[in-house]
Amino acid sequence: MNIAILGAGGIAGTVSRTLEQMKEINCYAVAARDLARAEKFAADHGYARAYGSYEEMLSDPAVELVYIATPHSHHFEHMKLCIEHGKPALCEKAFCETAEQAREIARLAKEKKVYVAEAIWPRYMPSRTLINDALASGIIGKVYTLTANLSYPISHVERIIRPELAGGALLDIGVYGINFMLMHFGEDIERIESSVRFADTGVDSDESITVFYRDGRMAVLTHSIYPRSDRKGIFHGDKGYMVVENINNPSDINIYDTSDRLIKHIEIPKQISGYEYEFIESIDCIKNGLTESRSMPLDESVKMMELMDTVRRGWGK
């Protein structure tokens, strides 16, 4: 399938290094607002065509799937543009800035029958099923709490620190903690409490989110743009606990009993990087005439944005 990249920034380059290794994909086109930048990106990553206009690239009939790699502040606009041109789109997380925008994209995609999906890679990975199967097996007994954290020293990155680019910890890395919780604890939430610290520019820089479930379970999520955290997700049960290394891209799953003895190690299947799964599923869905992802349907992207809106309202945002 001919893949086109909309936006020639850092994440586009990272993902392209995976696409170059996939037999299912032809790295066909890239577009940036600056043609010279698009041409350099195309030369660096083996794309056949370079465009200095998003609209021009989307008018190319050979484009079969567009990967949107622009800042969060532009996702809504660029997904609409893809839908208007009838081009299937896989959009980087966070899906939009607000739930209202997400609902509008879902409405337009369904109305125009154009495939649109959020590229939040853990949703598509085999580790998702491995974790849920282990929890369902009862190996750690009744699960009461989940803790998860994701922090990187990224406060120097322009799109992270600038409010006009929808920066901040929540939309960039907090989305992973929330996604991890929803994938493995579900959505039957009673209430949410959170604490936040803001950077000088006004974006959220550090946050702790506590989510209470109606069945008595609790999840505690922490995110920051300043330190490097251990990125662990830990499920606590009355017979033991399970540690997932790196909630962003799980590398190991280890299960311990109540005496801290390792009782089971679960291998993660070998992969190129982890990005390949979202493209493999999108290609399959498009070829089978589906207009949304099986692993990340549009309603789920809307729910993610609604939850983040709820958190921000608690901050007065």
Image: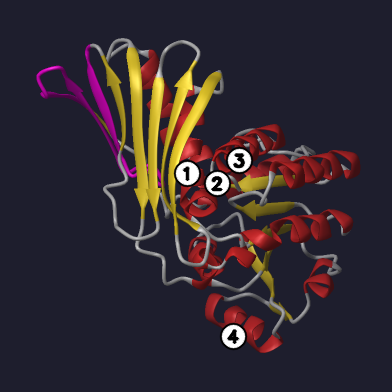
Q: How crowded is mark 3: few (under 14 residues within 10 Å), some or many (20 or more)?
A: few
At label 1, the amino acid type is Tyr
At label 2, the amino acid type is Ile
Ranked by sequence position, the earlier of labels 1 and 4 is 4
Q: Can residue 250 be found in the magenta stretch? A: yes
Local SS, label 3: helix
Instruction: Answer whether labels 1 and 2 touch (C-beta < 8 Å).
Output: yes
Q: Residues within 10 Å of mark 1 (few under 14, many from 20)?
A: many
Instruction: Answer whether labels 4 and 3 touch (C-beta < 8 Å).
Output: no
Instruction: Answer whether labels 2 and 4 touch (C-beta < 8 Å).
Output: no
Side of 133 where 232 appears, left or right: left
Side of 14 where 46 appears, left or right: right
- Give the residue at x 9% y 19%: 259
Local SS, label 1: helix
What range of the chain is rendered magenta?
Answer: 239-264
Q: Mark 4 points at which residue?
A: 40
| Of marks 1 and 2, the one in the foreground | 1
Quarter of the picture containing the N terminus is bottom right
| Of marks 2 and 3, the one in the foreground | 3
Q: Mark 2 points at which residue?
A: 120
Q: Name the residue under label 3.
A: 313
Can you tell which mark lies on residue 176? 1
- Give the residue at x 53% y 18%: 190
Closer to the camera, 48 or 149? 149
- Give the residue at x 26% y 47%: 230
Cα separation, mark 2 vs mark 3, equals 23 Å
Percent x, y of residue 71:
62, 64
Instruction: Answer whether labels 1 and 3 touch (C-beta < 8 Å).
Output: no
